Image (tube, helix red, strand yellow):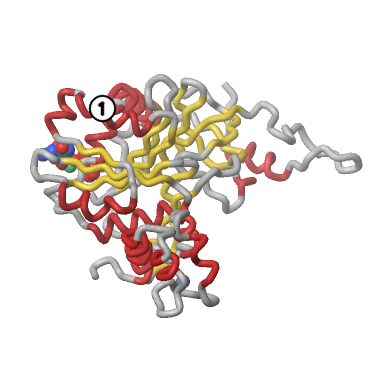
Amino acid sequence: MRRYGKHTDEDDIRSRPNRKGNRPRTHIRPKHEDAIEGMVLTVDRGRLTCLVDDRIVMAMKARELGRKAAVVGDRVAIVGDMTGKKDSLARIVRIADRKSVLRRTADDDDPYERVIVANADQLAIVTALADPEPRPRLIDRCLVAAFDAGLEPLLVMTKSDLASPDKLLELYGHLDIPYVVTSRAELESGDAVGRVREQLDGRITAFVGHSGVGKTTLVNSLVPEERRRLTGHVNAVTGRGRHTTTSALALPLAGDAGWVVDTPGLRSFGLHHVDPSRVIHAFPDLEPGTEGCPRACSHDEPDCALDAWVAEGHADPARLYSLRRMLATKERTEGD
Ligand SMILES: Nc1nc2c(ncn2[C@@H]2O[C@H](COP(=O)(O)OP(=O)(O)O)[C@@H](O)[C@H]2O)c(=O)[nH]1
Ligand SMILES: [Mg+2]
Ligand SMILES: [Zn+2]
């Protein structure tokens, strides 16, 4: 079996496209025509677990990608050893353009950006109704991140066996966000699965929320076989134990019906990177009203045109209140 050791990598990096008058020096695959497309399922210390057709393949980034990192959810082109055997390692030579990027700054004082997942189109914001107590501030921050990244938010309220969702529904009702409520009994009986699946089918959904809210329990009840299969494969290839909880993990929904992405628990959600105009864009009933605003309006000042917009009946005042709460979220620190 041919091994793709370090030297082969280096040779490939030096290769250049086969243009006239610039012929490559050695045997090379200029465009990696033999590359196969895959999806990054999880990342662990530079090792990327990818799904290629129906196979789990371990890969690392080729040096020719430079500083660009592949992240969970990325569609990638892979070459090399794709046998999926123990210690096999393929190389990622291309990353497809991303449809979306969900990022967070570590926190607002530390503007180092981390990409949580690429290509998602929905953000499931998971909150327990009790144990741990709901944290509306964190929910608001996740919402702002979703608006900024252009993901549609979905509110998932777990542990309804412990407390009622009424108070939270009142707080978030005016944002018109779809929601689902689940309990332990409904997860165990499978009753909740259909209801949750309705919101997920055909989409790539990233599940985020504080640690202990029930993300992993929910994702596993949605895709139990996939989870087991993937864990088994990763063990076989790496000889390592369980999936680490430091990276997101993407799993396909049965029937080619989209993907769910479990993520590690969030303690905070830094919003340093967020552009307020992207948040306003998520409020299409209010956005046109900002045309009458002074330049660089914070939308929470006496001259803001949105008050008149609402007074004239173009939008519900509760929506303006919600937008202002979202915009203020970015300026606030987590604990306020
Ligand atoms: N009472 C109750 N407990 C739940 C429910 N869903 C999950 N849990 C428990 O909450 C704890 C944390 O769940 P986990 O899925 O690991 O949360 P994660 O950190 O968000 O992934 C575990 O002990 C679960 O058994 C639920 O609907 N009701
Ligand atoms: Mg978890
Ligand atoms: Zn304004």
Instruction: Name the residue nearer the viewer: 36 or 91.
Output: 36
Left or right: residue 327 compared with residue 39: left
Residue with the most extreme bottom position: 302
Identify the residue at image location x=90%, y=39%: 20
Identify the residue at image location x=43%, y=71%: 299
Identify the residue at image location x=68%, y=32%: 32
Image coordinates of residue 209 in percent, x first then y, are 28, 49
Up the image or down, 165 lies above or below 236; here it is below
Up the image or down, 32 lies above or below 101; here it is above
Image coordinates of residue 45 in percent, x first then y, are 41, 46
Q: Quadrant of residue 303?
A: bottom left
Instruction: Name the residue nearer the viewer: 269 or 80.
Output: 269
Instruction: Name the residue nearer the viewer: 277 or 316.
Output: 316
Residue with the most extreme right position: 21
Identify the residue at image location x=55%, y=27%: 81
Q: Quadrant of residue 72?
A: top left
**Residue carrying label 1:** 193
Residue type at numbered disc 1? Val
SS state under label 1: helix
